[in-house]
């Protein structure tokens, strides 16, 4: 009798497991269909011009988090490639040097689309372009400018950048610019403009006139509030998360999130560990620091912590970024066989932020970004090849296909349309 009961419960257990497996497989198939049907847009992917040459470029599988093969594997349709320049002194010499850097990145993106892979990827300037190029079966490139510092004090450069393809621009990065204060002012409460400078106020007007989205992911809270008050079009946060869940100055607090909703903007939740869960990120980083150092030493490479960045020479910074992804990948693989490794910030943490913002400001004002090749990347979405995992997590949490389409890019394109509509009907 006892044996019969045991066999019964064994079969019951196996039956439950089979049903669970069946339901999970159905969920995966549902997520795959949704992922294939919606247009997936990542609004922040940094680039290195050395990966945009005739011999080394994104048609190959590189030691980068984004390239065309990875986009194909992960089903990432649109990458906003970033024209980034760091902050220097607010003087003509610094502006000129930064503009040279910016121009090299604009040109690199153009070369990829026009010369190296025209059958695989094209540059989009409007939402209609995005849909048309995607329908052709190609990947889509768009351009964002992270830091308006290289614009200098010549506002006509905004039009120049627009003609080169820029469709969003941030007025500062990590440091106060000639246009506005940066979020980094929170470190010491030292501010340069107490928000926008007079030049910054004119820049907001100029971007509205041209149809360039204003990105507030790096500017200070006061700068952001002044931009919203002045702008005649909705604005975006190209790569920021919710400050209520992770208290970092790069994130938006509830007041800012509600302003984004009130004025029709969108916040692109970012897959950056320290902007999603500080506690988990710091514990994991402290452990992995020695692992990465060991990997770098074994490869006879110099390795630095992010805090060392400002003190590095340009050559050291370049060498570090060239090897960064490779060392990180080897280190993460090594950690899988180690004991006592702290839990990594994951796709689940990313979607926690999406859930929070959707609950607070609504599904129409939230999107998704990675900050790949600029420090971004989390467990489950470590590069573009793993993009599907984000969709799978959204499906598991009950988001519909319509909602996922909005999160993955529909909301961002709606804002772009509105910004360009304001520009098309501009009257001085």
Image: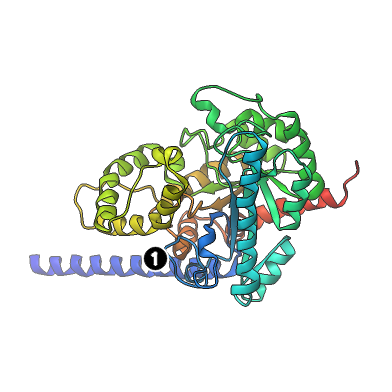
Q: Residue at x 73, y 38 (%)?
A: 153
Question: In what quadrant of the picture does the N terminus appear?
Answer: bottom left
Residue 221 position in % (x across, y down): 61, 30
Query: Does any portion of residue 357 appear in the rendered image?
Result: yes
Q: Mark 1 points at which residue?
A: 24
Of 265 and 283, nearer the camera is 283
Q: Place residue 52 in its image quadrant.
A: bottom right
Tell me if 372 is positioned left or right of 423 in this view: left
Question: In what quadrant of the picture does the C terminus appear?
Answer: top right
Q: Which residue lies furthest to the front in this view?
A: 93
Of 348 and 7, nearer the camera is 348
Of 337 and 303, nearer the camera is 303
Q: Place residue 136 in its image quadrant.
A: bottom right
Is 105 placed above or below 38 here? above
Residue 384 position in % (x across, y down): 48, 62
Applied colour scheme: rainbow
Circle 1 crowding by C-alpha within 10 Å: few under 14, some 14–19, many from 20? few
Q: Place residue 417 in its image quadrant.
A: bottom right
Q: Which residue lies furthest to the left in this view?
A: 2
């Amino acid at each position: 009798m006892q044996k019969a009961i045991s066999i019964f419960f064994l079969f019951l257990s196996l039956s439950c497991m089979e049903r669970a497996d069946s339901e999970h497989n159905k969920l995966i198939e549902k997520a795959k269909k949704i992922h294939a049907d919606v247009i997936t847009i990542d609004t922040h992917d940094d680039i290195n011009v050395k990966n945009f040459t005739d011999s080394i470029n994104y048609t190959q599988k590189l030691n980068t988090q984004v390239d065309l093969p990875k986009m194909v594997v992960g089903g990432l349709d649109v990458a906003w490639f970033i024209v980034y320049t760091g902050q220097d002194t607010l003087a003509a010499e610094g502006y000129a040097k930064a503009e040279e850097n910016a121009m090299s990145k604009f040109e690199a993106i153009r070369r990829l689309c026009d010369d190296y892979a025209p059958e695989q990827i094209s540059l989009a300037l409007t939402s209609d372009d995005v849909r048309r190029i995607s329908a052709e079966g190609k990947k889509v490139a768009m351009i964002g400018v992270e830091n308006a510092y290289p614009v200098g004090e010549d506002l006509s450069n905004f039009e120049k950048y627009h003609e080169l393809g820029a469709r969003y621009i941030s007025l500062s990065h990590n440091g106060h610019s000639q246009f506005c204060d940066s979020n980094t002012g929170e470190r010491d409460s030292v501010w340069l403009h107490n928000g926008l400078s007079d030049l910054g106020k004119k820049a907001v007007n100029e971007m509205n006139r041209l149809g360039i989205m204003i990105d507030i992911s790096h500017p200070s809270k006061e700068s952001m509030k002044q931009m919203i008050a002045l702008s005649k079009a909705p604005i975006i946060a190209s790569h920021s998360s919710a400050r209520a869940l992770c208290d970092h100055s790069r994130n938006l607090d509830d007041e800012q999130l509600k302003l984004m909703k009130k004025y029709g903007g969108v916040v692109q939740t970012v897959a950056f560990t320290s902007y999603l869960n500080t506690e988990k990120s710091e514990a994991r980083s402290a452990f992995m620091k020695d692992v990465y150092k060991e990997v770098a030493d074994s490869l006879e490479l110099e390795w630095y912590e992010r805090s060392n960045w400002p003190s590095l020479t340009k050559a050291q910074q370049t060498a570090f970024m060239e090897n960064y992804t490779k060392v990180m990948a080897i280190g993460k693989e090594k950690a899988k066989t180690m004991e006592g490794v702290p839990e990594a910030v994951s796709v689940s943490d990313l979607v926690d932020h999406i859930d929070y913002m959707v609950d607070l400001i609504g599904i129409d004002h939230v999107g998704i970004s990675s900050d790949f090749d600029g420090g971004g990347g989390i467990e489950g979405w470590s590069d573009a090849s793993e993009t599907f995992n984000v969709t799978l997590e959204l499906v598991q949490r009950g988001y519909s296909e319509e909602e996922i389409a909005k999160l993955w890019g529909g909301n961002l394109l709606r804002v772009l349309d509105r910004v360009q509509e304001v520009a098309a009907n501009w009257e001085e």
